[in-house]
Image (cartoon, helix red, strand yellow):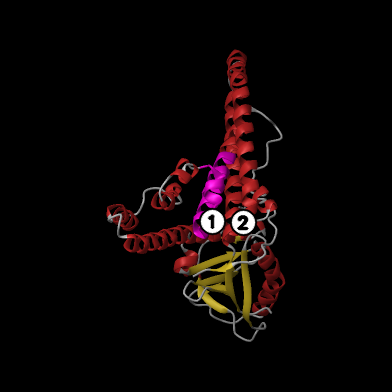
């Protein structure tokens, strides 16, 4: 395979969301460290007396930082054990940001901020997955007060407790819940029917919330995976996997060539093809087109693997050999502008932690 390629997209929701959480955590730590370096540079210009006062102030807060860090790490460990109901422990462990080598207050604060964010994401993921499956993990988690106390509540309250972590109850769900509350005690058949309807609407609400989270996670995973492989990538829209769209990426040294990825959300497919940017007056074919396709052919498996370990599986359904179709020529002013080779920085390549390949997946709608 070296020509245009079509693949069916299959996403494992939890794997993709955990991979996205790991990426966001690593980004947060990197941003925190950059801010710490900036602050250290500022402090270097201050007087010794001021630096001594600063060191004394931060040392007083260090113990509190360490205590909060231990408590948050303990909560992360608890969530990791509970996550074993749905996903392998190593996938959850991969979301944990790396602890700083230099345990200054600035680095600790950056690490703690990222860890807090991961814990919040993981808690929400597990509660949502529990509500989606309508199992008992929600009560077992004891993370949400409403769910923790659900055993003493009515069936309606228990159902509503399952989506308490998603914010305000939608009006359509609240209306059915009120109907159940207002129904005569003697009309058990009506109550049962309404309860079934309530369960269905809650299920639909949870499915919609998770679907949006998966789509946003998939876009982030795609963009970061391409960056990790050394490509320059135009911004990937959060709605790429729900509305469809086009993403271009290239490697330094590719001159006017790049790869165009087109996602068709209706069919759940991704189409890859090499294109060449041309001026309006230059539409001649080049002998280099075939070489550009062969080069992309050699690199494509690495992208498949990088996405697969993060929960996005591309099942190739159509592949053409180089030259079967001419390389598409696209006007330069219709394509994104990438940084020049001299200006392109490797600092945007985030070394995301490895996430093992998931056992199964669900298709994107």
The residue lying furthest to the bottom in this view is 324
The one nearer the camera, 64 or 108, is: 64
The residue lying furthest to the top in this view is 49
Q: Nearer the viewer, mark 2 or mark 1?
A: 1
Q: Main secondary structure of the magenta part?
A: helix
Horizontal relation, residue 358 to residue 244: left or right: right
233 falls in the magenta region: no
**Picture quadrant of residue 88:** bottom right
Mark 2: secondary structure: loop
Mark 1: secondary structure: loop
The residue lying furthest to the front in this view is 186
Percent x, y for residue 68? Answer: 59, 30
Percent x, y for residue 266? Answer: 46, 74
Pointer 2: what residue?
Answer: 86
Percent x, y for residue 292? Answer: 66, 74
Is residue 276 visible from the viewing direction of this image? yes
Is residue 235 visible from the viewing direction of this image? no
Question: Is there a contact, CB below 8 Å, between mark 2 and mark 1?
Answer: no
Q: Quadrant of the N terminus?
A: bottom right
Q: CA distance from mark 2 to mark 1?
A: 11 Å
Say which residue appears at 57% left-offset and 44% top-offset. Answer: 118
**Mark 2 neighbour density, 10 Å: few (under 14) some (14–19) many (20 or more):** few
Span of residues in magenta: 114-143
- In the image, residue 65 above or below residue 231: above
The one nearer the camera, 301 or 227, is: 301
Pointer 1: what residue?
Answer: 135
**Picture quadrant of residue 176:** bottom left
Say which residue appears at 63% left-offset and 74% top-offset. Answer: 315
């Amino acid at each position: 395979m070296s020509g245009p390629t079509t693949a069916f997209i299959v996403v494992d929701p939890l794997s993709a969301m955990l991979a996205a959480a790991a990426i966001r955590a690593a980004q947060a730590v990197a941003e925190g460290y950059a801010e710490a370096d900036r602050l250290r540079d500022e402090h270097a210009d201050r007087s010794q007396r001021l630096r001594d006062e600063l060191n004394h102030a931060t040392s007083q807060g260090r113990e509190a930082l360490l205590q909060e860090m231990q408590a948050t790490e303990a909560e992360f460990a608890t969530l990791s054990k509970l996550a074993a109901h749905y996903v392998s422990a190593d996938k959850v462990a991969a979301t944990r940001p790396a602890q700083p080598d230099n345990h200054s207050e600035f680095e600790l604060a950056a690490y703690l901020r990222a860890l807090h964010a991961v814990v919040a994401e993981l808690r929400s993921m597990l509660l949502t997955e529990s509500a989606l499956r309508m199992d008992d993990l929600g009560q077992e988690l004891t993370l949400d007060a409403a769910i923790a106390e659900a055993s003493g509540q009515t069936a309606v309250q228990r159902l509503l407790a399952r989506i308490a972590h998603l914010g305000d109850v939608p009006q359509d769900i609240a209306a059915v819940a009120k109907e159940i509350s207002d129904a005569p005690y003697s009309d058990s058949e009506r109550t049962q029917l309404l309860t079934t309807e309530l369960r269905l609407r809650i299920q639909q609400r949870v499915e919609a919330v998770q679907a949006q989270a998966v789509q946003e996670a998939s876009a982030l995973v795609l963009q970061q995976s391409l960056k990790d492989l050394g490509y320059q990538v135009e911004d990937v829209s959060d709605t790429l996997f729900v509305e469809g769209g086009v993403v271009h990426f290239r490697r330094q040294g590719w001159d006017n060539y790049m790869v165009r990825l087109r996602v068709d959300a209706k069919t759940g497919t991704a189409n890859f093809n090499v294109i060449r940017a041309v001026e309006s007056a230059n539409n001649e074919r080049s002998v280099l087109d075939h070489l550009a396709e062969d080069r992309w052919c050699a690199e494509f498996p690495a992208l498949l693997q990088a996405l697969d370990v993060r929960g996005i599986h591309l099942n190739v359904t159509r592949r053409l050999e180089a030259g079967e179709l001419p390389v598409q020529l696209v006007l330069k002013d219709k394509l994104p502008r990438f940084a020049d080779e001299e200006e392109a920085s490797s600092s945007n390549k985030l070394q995301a932690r490895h996430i093992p390949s998931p056992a199964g997946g669900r298709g994107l709608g």
